[in-house]
């Protein structure tokens, strides 16, 4: 793997098309910044329409090429597994690249890199398990069956917060099925996707099966989502961008799978061990500095426990260590972008303006060592209500609003009073109540007495404006394959073409 942390400093990264690094047509390169210092780290190529077209054509050719199209599913599975093994071999390097690119904790990125190979292994095992079915029809001497086939070129647009983790969830199954891929990583975290494309070649995956077009969303992303040669899109990102992409794709009548934003309710009932619930709420919102789609940013607490819960939450929040993402004792690192920091500041200010109170955090850390980076203290806001702007919009930062509720009816109303429906969490010892909540809440995933406990073995996705389609489990294999119905008449009889046979 040529792309390493050391090699990246001051370097220029090209596009990855047809198995090799390729200069962009425009000759343009854009800096990527280190969020701990706000200084440029490396430059990536800005792909335009022409580069996107070359990449899609390369993926189309690879889709038809016998080296991929005529490979048995078992052999394809072996390559997928091999790619996962290579990720494992380079886990520390890849983790360090992502940590430097997006400012997330090194220990978290390392944990992700260790989980990713298992995900490849899981989907590799599905390569030879995707099967069609036969259909009993009201015709004698007829065999009617459905074939499951790959769909073609899949366009993938991923965000900066966990690039390889996000990518793997659909890339691994797409490879196992036999699709080919064009990925557009985020302009804020490009390098690890290019490193992965290199590893794919090393794994023996034919050139053109995975192509990477770097660049910004408005140019490269837009060109990819307008290209008529793409069979399906995978998008992970904000709801606003999702709307644009779905609009572009609709012009070519191409389906999308959308994993969008969230404003997830995190519920605490008075019957629960408060310390445990506080830990759950803290990790639900502050992990990755709140830059996770499932962040439990709206915390609803049963009124009788509200005061003591807030007290414990504030005390625990003040002990969260904000620091350099590489340090072992850091709990949360910087935000990934300067714009993200501004967004967090402005939402906290809007909450205060609307009458809410900051109970913890609410500013940048005072530590001079962190002054240059895009850091923000974990923030608890009380005296809030659910219709305040900071309680309705996705902030994607370390900010939680706490609101009391009286009973289950009010809770469900509050929890579902959002345009999103990605995840929800509930802490209670009463399983009946937990199940009533799980059934009534609008969320693709519900966690009971836990939070952020995701698994690639289960199907995840959103409801409402949080998107559609599912990733994980066998469900994703159906999402990225297509059915073709085939009918065989084995009667051997010569039919009169103009006789209509009634049953
Ligand atoms: P964005 O929607 O801004 O960007 C996501 C990706 O889309 C990036 O690669 C971006 O490119 C690209 N993009 C931007 N505009 C366009 C366009 N017009 N056409 C095509 N592509 C475009 O989201 P963020 O990167 O800011 O990521 C944070 C968001 O992602 C949050 O809202 C979060 O909830 C969501 N998210 C959802 C997850 C889920 O599983 N549901 C998981 C993780 C994040 P570029 O950045 O280079 O401009």
Image (spheres, rainbow, N blue to C red):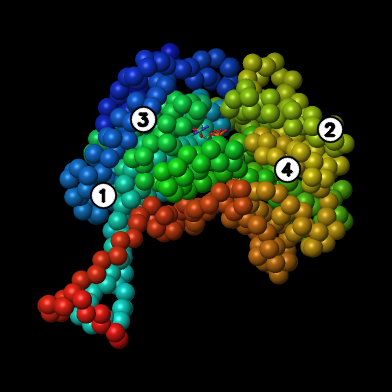
- How far apart are the two marked residues, 1 and 4, measured between alpha carbons? 44 Å
Residue 415 x/y as whole percent:
73, 54
Q: Give the SS element for disc 2.
A: helix
- Ligand 1 lies under 8 Å from the Cβ of mark 2: no
Disc 2 vs disc 3: which is toward the camera? 3
Disc 2 vs disc 1: which is toward the camera? 2
Q: Earlier in the sequence, mark 2 or mark 1?
A: 1
Of the four image quadrants, the one with ligand 1 is top right
* Picture residue at 38% right of the left edge, 52% below the top: 480
Q: Which mark is residue 76?
A: 1
Q: Which mark is residue 392?
A: 4
Disc 1 vs disc 3: which is toward the camera? 3
Q: Residues within 10 Å of mark 2 (few under 14, many from 20)?
A: some
Q: Which mark is residue 352?
A: 2
Q: Give the SS element for disc 3.
A: helix
* Picture residue at 79% right of the left edge, 32% below the top: 350
Q: Earlier in the sequence, mark 4 or mark 2?
A: 2
Disc 1 vs disc 4: which is toward the camera? 4
Q: The C terminus lies in which quarter of the figure?
A: bottom left
């Amino acid at each position: 793997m040529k792309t390493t942390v050391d090699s990246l400093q001051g370097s220029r990264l090209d596009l990855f098309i047809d198995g090799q690094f390729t200069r962009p047509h425009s000759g343009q390169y854009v800096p990527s910044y280190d969020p701990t210092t706000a200084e440029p780290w490396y430059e990536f190529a800005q792909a335009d329409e022409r580069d996107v077209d070359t990449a899609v054509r390369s993926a189309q050719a690879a889709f038809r090429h016998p080296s991929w199209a005529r490979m048995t599913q078992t052999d394809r599975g072996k390559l997928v597994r091999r790619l996962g093994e290579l990720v494992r071999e380079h886990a520390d390097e890849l983790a360090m690249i992502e940590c430097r690119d997006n400012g997330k904790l090194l220990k978290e990125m390392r944990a992700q890199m260790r989980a990713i190979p298992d995900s490849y292994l899981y989907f590799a095992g599905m390569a030879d398990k995707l099967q069609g079915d036969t259909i009993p029809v009201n015709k004698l001497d007829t065999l009617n069956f459905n074939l499951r086939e790959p769909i073609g070129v899949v366009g993938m647009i991923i965000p900066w917060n966990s690039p390889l983790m996000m990518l793997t969830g659909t890339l691994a199954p797409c490879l196992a099925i036999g699709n080919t891929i064009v990925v557009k990583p985020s302009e804020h975290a490009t390098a690890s996707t290019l490193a992965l494309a290199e590893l794919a070649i090393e794994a023996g995956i034919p050139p053109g099966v995975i192509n990477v077009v770097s660049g910004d969303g408005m140019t490269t992303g837009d060109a990819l989502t307008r290209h008529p040669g793409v069979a399906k899109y995978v998008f992970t990102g904000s709801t606003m961008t999702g709307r644009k992409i779905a609009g572009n794709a609709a012009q070519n009548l191409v389906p999308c799978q959308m994993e969008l934003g969230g404003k997830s309710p995190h519920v605490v009932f008075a019957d629960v061990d408060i310390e445990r619930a506080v830990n759950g709420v803290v990790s639900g919102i502050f992990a990755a500095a709140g830059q996770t789609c499932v962040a439990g940013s709206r915390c609803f607490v049963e009124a009788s426990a509200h005061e003591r819960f807030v007290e414990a939450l504030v005390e625990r929040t003040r002990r969260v260590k904000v620091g350099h993402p590489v340090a072992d004792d850091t709990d949360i690192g910087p935000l990934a972008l300067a714009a993200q920091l501004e967004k967090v500041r402005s939402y906290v200010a809007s909450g205060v303006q609307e009458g809410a109170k900051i109970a913890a955090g609410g500013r940048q850390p005072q530590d001079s060592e962190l002054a240059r980076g895009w850091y923000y203290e974990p923030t608890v806001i009380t005296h809030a209500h659910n219709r305040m702007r900071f309680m309705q919009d996705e902030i994607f930062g370390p900010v939680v609003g706490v609101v009391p509720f009286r009973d289950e009816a009010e809770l469900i109303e509050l929890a579902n009073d959002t345009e999103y429906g990605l995840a929800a969490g509930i802490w209670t010892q009463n399983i009946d109540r937990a199940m009533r909540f799980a059934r009534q809440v609008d969320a693709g995933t519900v966690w009971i007495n836990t939070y952020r406990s995701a698994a690639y073995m289960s199907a995840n996705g959103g409801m409402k404006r949080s998107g559609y389609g599912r990733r994980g489990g066998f469900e994703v294999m159906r999402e990225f394959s297509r059915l073709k119905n085939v009918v065989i008449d084995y009667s051997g009889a010569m039919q009169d073409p103009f006789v209509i046979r009634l049953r």
